Amino acid sequence: MFRRDRSQRGLAQVTVPCSGVPHSPTIHLVAHPAFVVDLAKLTRQWGRDTFRLMTLPVIIMKPSAFLPVSMSLAALAVVLFHIAIFGAAREADEGAAAHLWQLLMVAQLPLLLFFSVRWLPRSPKQAAQVLALQVGAAVAALAPVFFLNL
């Protein structure tokens, strides 16, 4: 991981390839060996995304980020489809659409919790933006149910 440079006593030159960025050069850092971190060991411990630049498009592609949003949009589609076919009248017995909506909304909660635990400490700004998107999608799915008293 590092090699000693003869011109600078006691210092080590660290070669770090920028693997997340295409066509990027290798970075050479000079540091004291006591401060050199084994990046391969950290990557094995914390996962391969540890040292990638976490931007919003990168985080939103994680399943724990886009699945709750897609589940909220699916719940919204179920409600809108039910309203389009059967109307907005309240039924005496809950149908399959209501049960499907409930399952989709409740199944998001463990994914939201996992996303929050995993990504808020690593990149708080981008994770907060994704959480805002997830909450907005959930509110969009909840709104027709509450406003139309379904």
Image (cartoon, rainbow, N blue to C red):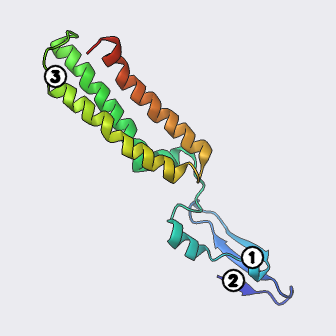
Callout 2 crowding tier (Cα within 10 Å): few <14, some 14–19, many ≥20: some
Residue 41 lies in what quarter of the image?
A: bottom right
Give the residue displayed 40% in from the left and 23% down from the top: 140
The x and y percentages for residue 107 are: 31, 41
Q: Left or right: 4 with respect to 59?
A: right
Q: Quadrant of the C terminus?
A: top left
The x and y percentages for residue 108 are: 35, 40
Under mark 3, the amino acid is: Glu
Mark 3 / mark 1, whichever is N-terminal: 1
Residue 67 lies in what quarter of the image?
A: top left
- Determine contact: label 1, label 2, CB under 8 Å: no
Mark 1 / mark 2, whichever is N-terminal: 2
Q: Left or right: 11 with respect to 55?
A: right
Q: Nearer the viewer, residue 60 or 100?
A: 100
Is label 1 or label 2 in front? 1
As drawn, the label of residue 2 is 2
**The residue tagged with tag 3: helix, strand or loop?**
loop
Q: Quadrant of the N terminus?
A: bottom right
Residue under label 1:
35
Image height check: is 72 above or below 65?
A: above
Mark 3 / mark 2, whichever is N-terminal: 2
Under mark 2, the amino acid is: Phe
Callout 3 crowding tier (Cα within 10 Å): few <14, some 14–19, many ≥20: few
As drawn, the label of residue 94 is 3
Residue 66 lies in what quarter of the image?
A: top left
Alpha-carbon distance for marks 3 and 2? 65 Å
Image height check: is 138 above or below 148?
A: below
